[in-house]
Image (cartoon, grey):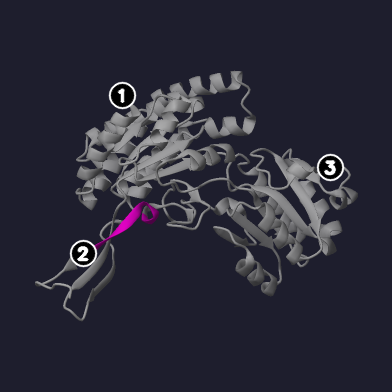
Amino acid sequence: MTVLEQGQRARAAARVLALRTDGARQEALEQMAAALTRRTPEILAENARDLTAAEADGMSAALLDRLRLTEGRLADMAGAVRGVAALPDPLGRVTMDETRPNGLRITRVSVPLGVLAVIFEARPNVTADSAALAVRSGNAVILRGGREAIRSNRAIAAALREGLRASAVPEDAVQLVEDVSRESAQALMSLRGYVDLLIPRGGAGLIRAVVDNARVPVIETGAGTCHTYVDRSADPAMAARIICNAKTQRPSVCNACECILVHREIAARALPVIWAELKKKGVELRGDPEVRAVLAEARPAGADDWGREYGDLILAARVVGSMDEALDHIARYGTGHSECIVTEDRAAAEEFLRRVDAAAVYVNASTRFTDGGEFGFGAEIGISTQKLHARGPLGLSALTSWKYLVRGSGQIRG
């Protein structure tokens, strides 16, 4: 089947899905989750084949972890689908209902976007998360993953479609593009009239390629050069815990910390404490001259270490003389994803919150919390780093639009 034919089928499925009741959409997700559980052995077998091929191709340990599925991760995947089913219905929400002086009653209600497309890399969980969020919000979805995860994605998509066949939702509401060539990605990016919104999930290169080449609307997501600024009043032990978690809990993801900025007044005390925790986890630290004056083990940081998304156990570090200097660094090198300050100074915390321009800004907490599940959205279809339509974790409400219902009694405009 061609990508165009998939777009046509998705458009037809979306028209049917938009008319399904909340209960029908919830039941569809329950069936999808049950099918994932039933097909766990098959999915794990296909994932093992992907992992073997990826290892042979020299994929890094961090990216292999992103690709790897286990019984526990599949159980979590099915649980996330059920979690989305349990969320309130995002459709039919009334945000305006008023009668104009001429007697026209105008009501604004939430409606599906229509057909979503998601282009992503070696993240099999994206297949299930995206499908669940799309169906729950009344949208059809076309999924196009990378070649590294094609076997896993095929098995997961087959399970999801099996679940849909047992429900009142058309199985073509969830489709996978099995052709992983560059041509298939370009075809999907060009489906004007069929795709209402395209969401790329992956590294900076993928996102840039989609933004530069798509002929359909795009939400820019994912690229995460996240910073943690250790203010002069910070508790070094707290800073160490937060930074270690933000860097090492899952280094391959977009909300991992990639750079720390440490105030000069606390650098001599804080850096050894922070490094002691990072060293236990095998982190490579790359520092500027002031960092290396305190930590001889740090490697020299080059110009390309600032603003870099490592996706690995590597962390850049710089000493700054003030919050202004830290904010300037973040404004220059940040990607608008997630930024953090560690401080005991309430005024400094509030200033940081006010001045940093990012989707999520933290005080004394790991940037790893920028996640749809952690924010109470059930799951996410991506994390938007732009400002139009939606920003931050893209949950159900971000996958809807508005329709104005205008009721009259014969009014004409003079």
Residue 352 is situated, as x and y percent measured from the top left of the image, at 65, 67
Q: Are marks 1 and 2 in contact (CB under 8 Å)?
A: no
Residue 14, how many percent across, how many down?
A: 25, 43
For label 1, the residue is 1
Per the model, the C-alpha gap separating discs 1 and 2 is 38 Å
Q: Main secondary structure of the magenta part?
A: strand
Is there any visible trace of residue 270 in the rendered image?
A: yes
In the picture shown, does residue 347 fall above or below 201? below
Question: Which is more N-terminal, label 2 or label 1?
Answer: 1
User: Closer to the camera, 86 or 403?
Assistant: 403
Question: Within 10 Å of the Cα at label 3, are there few (<14), some (14-19), or many (20+) other Cα atoms?
Answer: some
The span shown in magenta is: 397-404
Helix, strand or loop status at disc 3: strand
Q: Callout 2: helix, strand or loop?
A: strand
- Name the mark on residue 405: 2
Q: Which mark is residue 211?
A: none
- Circle count: 3
Q: Which residue is mark 3?
A: 300
Nearer the observer, 149 or 203: 203
